[in-house]
Amino acid sequence: MLAARASSTRNVQRLARSFATVVDTTGVKVAAVDYNQPTSSVTILVKAGSRFEPKKGVANALKNFAFKSTTKRSTIGTVRESDLYGGVLTSSLGREHLALTAEFLRADAPFFVDVLSSFITSARFTRHEFEEYVTPLVEADTEAVSHDSATQAIEAAHALAFRSGLGSSLFSPAHSGLTVEDVKAFAATAFSKGNIAVLGTGIDQGTLSGLVEKAFANAAASNEATTPTSKYFGGETRLEASSGPQTVFFGFGTAGAPVPEVAALAAYLSPTPSVKWSKGLSPLAAVPEGTSVQTIYLPYSDASLFGLLVQGSTAAGVKEASKVAVAALKAAAKGIKAEELKSAVAKAKFAAASAADTREGLVNVLGSKILSGSPATLDATLSSLDSVKATGFSKTATSLISAKPTYVVVGDSHALPYADELGL
Amino acid sequence: MFGPLGLSLAPYVQSSRTLSKWITPVANWYVNAAGYRKYGFKYDDILVEENPTVQRALTRLTPREKYDRAYRLKRASQASVLHAPLPKELWITEAEDVRYLRPHVEEVAKEEEERKKWDNLIVQRK
């Protein structure tokens, strides 16, 4: 018992010092976490996700333009110099943010912060680089997603659920007609101080603030990017795909800040077993052989999308599995037992906490908090999950599934079920 | 000095006011005497293009510039077939004879130079 108490107090301490406070350095928000790792990483988060894009595919093109030539150094200079320092540069795009990340050895922070910030402050956006390097990457992204039914289904679900804003795709359309001028104009509006946050791991807050202050000393300061608040619509679409697994996605969205009850519902339904080689106790564990179900829970700053993704090799199997999934979701909305709720909450809390363990996860979890200037900790998320009650759970779940469903099938669209056949 | 653009003393001449005052009329006479403008060429159309640097620079022209260049080349070969310069109203004037390709060639050359620098870099431990 003593040992248990000791370990729980240690946990509290660790949580308390886990995340740094957000400091505003010359208009740029900076947060740093240091666990004494041997390597550091710095991520520049820009409010330039696909929901802010003025033209389809611009955000994806901007993501692929990262680390090309700037007035400070050329493309090859960036690549070769980072090679010499042994760092890794990545850029990734979400619906809300564009994240530019550098991972490097601790001593090399000044160089890598400079590489990241010079793209923000002085990228050249040359036409030949757009045509020679960026367009092939944009097309490759589009090509890759056209072979991935799950991603395709979730993209289509976003478009149905939120239409504009969050509905715009992370990928460029196949024949987008984008020009470098579009990318340049988007970057000019997005790359201003109010839209930028810097998140460091394995780096001291003071060091990072100093570097950021120097780097963004003469960055443009303009208004924060805003979009109309998201609304949920829903609808049905059927996409024909000749290859890949048969896929059904059905989900429900909510406008407004994500609520912990939905996270608990996702954890309750999630069929991922906690022990290897077991089927788990989830109500979705009963789906037929050869099919799989995943819970998808995507919280955004002002909306969230929750749904179940059913995949399998045959349309008949997927239809059967989808029926099981719909029945499980409806049963969950009627109310679940207290101990089931307890384990679901524990599972959700673990998922939320362990997501912050990896670098990408940390950026996803804390990114929006840092940008909005609220304290960059997990405490609020975890304590809100603690306060989930059985009545609130069933009330939220009932109102969630009473909305118009978002229903997407990808695959053999003649054989895959329609929404009304599943009782949605 | 012997880049894809060829040997040029122009920067030196332009840096000296006296020299450029003396040489500019001669240069203008020489350009007209060379006769490429009479065949509807701009100077960058007759730049030696049989090397990778200029080939890469050519891909960086805008579609409009590429089209116009191809048109001038075809028009000039037709004039060559006819063994006569173009009619005078089609001659390229001094104002039209802009170096549209030179900035791209210079940039490609600079990139190649930089690549060479990085390829032959000697790294020293500090």
Image (cartoon, coloured by chain):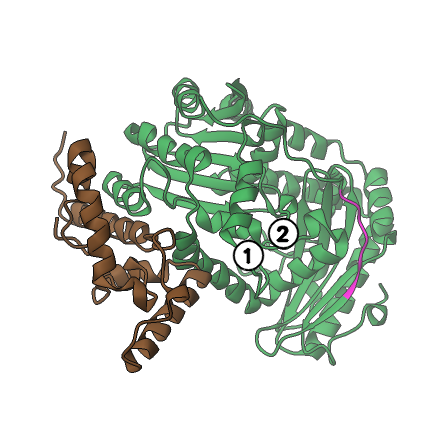
Chain colours: A green, B brown
Give the residue pinned by disc 2: A55
Per the image, is A29 magenta? no
Do the CB atoms of the residues marked 2 and 1 lie less than 8 Å apart?
yes
Tag 2's secondary structure? loop
Mark 2, Cα crowd under 10 Å, few <14 / some 14-19 / many 20+, is: some
Horizontal and vertical percent position of residue A268:
71, 49
Q: Is residue A111 left or right of residue A296?
A: left
Residue, disc 1: A178
Could you confirm whether marks 2 and 1 are on the same chain? Answer: yes
Mark count: 2
Quadrant of the frame with the N terminus of chain A: top right
Q: Can the viewer see residue A354 in this picture?
A: no
* Residue nearest the viewer, comparing A66 with B108: B108
Query: Which stretch appears magenta?
Result: A230-236
- Quarter where residue B13 is shown: top left
Tell me the element at label 1: loop
Type of the residue with mark 2: Lys
In the image, which disc is placed on residue A210?
none
In this rendering, position of residue A402 left or right of residue B6: right
Quick check: is A232 in the magenta stretch?
yes
Expressed as whole percent of the image width and height from the top left, the position of residue B20 reads 19, 38
**Which residue is at 41% across, 28% downward?**
A35
